[in-house]
Image (cartoon, grey):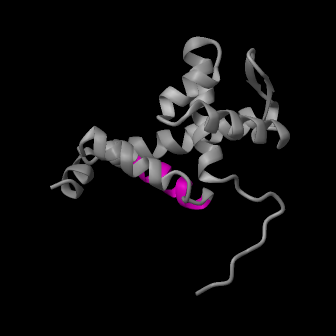
Amino acid sequence: MPAKKKTATPRSSAAVEDYLERILELINTKGYARVVDIAQSLKISQASVTNMIQRMDTDGLLKYERYRGMVLTASGEALAKNITRRHRILTDFLRLFGLDEELIFHDVEGMEHHVSPPTLNAIEALTAQLRKQPALLARVTQ
């Protein structure tokens, strides 16, 4: 097994990524994100959300004011947009194969946290090529 490379900036945890993805989604659709909305969306307790939000505030991913809500910092927004991009690329790829949307959602939720940037770029390029070549896509999906 190859040795793991050390990176200057460690990847965030899957939980942090899920929160960032959901916060950005809420901000984009509602204009704001509140603890209650995040808890409802992720199906977890408000206390758990508050603890994570406070941790993310300490880590500089967002600014949180109790009872007022939160805003993503520049680094938090950049990470959230990257997570959203990974989610979109993986979803687009799996949709090419006509898989059930619920299955795609669950698979992507697991994969999006573990796919490396080079692999994601390869999947994005493959998706583009399959869209340009319907005959090839038809052969692959038979």
* Whole-percent x, y for residue 38 in the image: 57, 28
Q: Residue at x 76, y 59 (%)?
A: 10
Q: Residue at x 62, y 28 (%)?
A: 23
Residue 64 falls in image quadrant: top right
Q: Nearer the viewer, residue 80 or 93?
A: 80
Q: Nearer the viewer, residue 131 or 37?
A: 37
- State left or right for residue 142 relative to residue 25: left
The question of residue 51 being in magenta is answered with no
Q: Nearer the viewer, residue 28 or 134?
A: 28
Most extreme residue toward the left is 142
Indicate whether 15 appears above or below 1: above
Residue 57 falls in image quadrant: top right
Q: How many marks?
A: 0
- State left or right for residue 105 relative to residue 139: right
* Whole-percent x, y for residue 76 in the image: 75, 36
Most extreme residue toward the bottom is 1
Q: Residue at x 59, y 35 (%)?
A: 21
Residue stretch in magenta? 118-127
Q: Nearer the viewer, residue 68 or 71?
A: 68
Whether residue 76 is visible: yes
**What type of secondary structure mainly makes up the magenta span?**
helix
Image quadrant containing the C terminus = bottom left
Whether residue 128 is visible: no
Image quadrant containing the N terminus = bottom right
Q: Residue at x 54, y 60 (%)?
A: 119
* Whole-percent x, y for residue 34 in the image: 64, 20
- State left or right for residue 84 relative to residue 54: left
Indicate whether 124 appears above or below 31: below
